[in-house]
């Protein structure tokens, strides 16, 4: 996950450097996705969806976030290749 996250950061920083409409759209999407991911985790925690043990909760939270990061890496990489 750390490698995917650093890759996403690099792709986003490259996009933000252009300072154009696409960069602004990406920034808005990034913030809304982060808020959504945290809200989903909070709901999972409140309803017991993360499990009962601290280790299980941490593992499920990381899995949840890993999926989000991987999805962003694929999306941003595909856009970069298309450009």
Image (cartoon, helix red, strand yellow):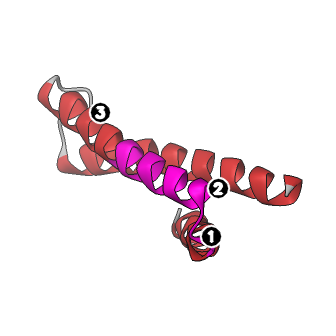
| Magenta stretch holds residue 33 | yes
As drawn, the residue found furthest toward the front would be 20
The image quadrant that residue 46 belongs to is top left
Identify the residue under disc 3: 40
Query: Would you say the residues marked 1 and 3 are in contact, meaning their CB atoms lie under 8 Å apart?
Result: no
Is 27 situated above or below 53? below
Identify the residue under disc 1: 7
Q: For this view, does 47 lie left or right of residue 79? A: left
Quick one: label 3, few (<14), some, or many (20+) residues within 10 Å?
some
Tell me the tag on residue 49.
Answer: none
**Viewer-side residue, 61 vs 5:** 5
Q: For this view, does 49 lie left or right of residue 46? A: right
On the image, the x and y values in percent for residue 38 come to 27, 43
On the image, the x and y values in percent for residue 48 come to 18, 26
- The magenta-colored residue range is 18-34
Query: Would you say the residues marked 1 and 2 are in contact, meaning their CB atoms lie under 8 Å apart?
Result: yes
Q: For this view, does 4 lie left or right of residue 58? A: right
The image quadrant that residue 17 belongs to is bottom right
Identify the residue under disc 2: 73
As drawn, the residue found furthest toward the right would be 82
Q: Considering only order in the chain, which callout, 3 or 2, is on the residue closer to the N terminus? A: 3
Q: Considering only order in the chain, which callout, 2 or 1, is on the residue closer to the N terminus? A: 1
- Residue at image location 50% in from the left, 45% down from the top: 68
Q: Considering only order in the chain, which callout, 3 or 1, is on the residue closer to the N terminus? A: 1
On the image, the x and y values in percent for residue 61 come to 33, 46
| Magenta stretch holds residue 51 | no
The image quadrant that residue 76 belongs to is bottom right
Quick one: label 2, few (<14), some, or many (20+) residues within 10 Å?
many
- Residue at image location 79% in from the left, 51% down from the top: 78
């Amino acid at each position: 996950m750390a490698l995917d996250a650093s890759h996403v950061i690099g792709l986003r920083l490259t996009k933000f450097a252009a300072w154009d409409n696409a960069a602004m759209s990406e920034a808005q999407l990034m913030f809304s996705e982060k808020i959504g991911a945290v809200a989903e985790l909070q709901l999972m925690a409140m309803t017991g969806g993360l499990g009962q043990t601290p280790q299980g909760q941490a593992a499920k939270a990381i899995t949840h976030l890993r999926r989000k990061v991987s999805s962003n890496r694929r999306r941003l990489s595909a856009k970069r290749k298309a450009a």
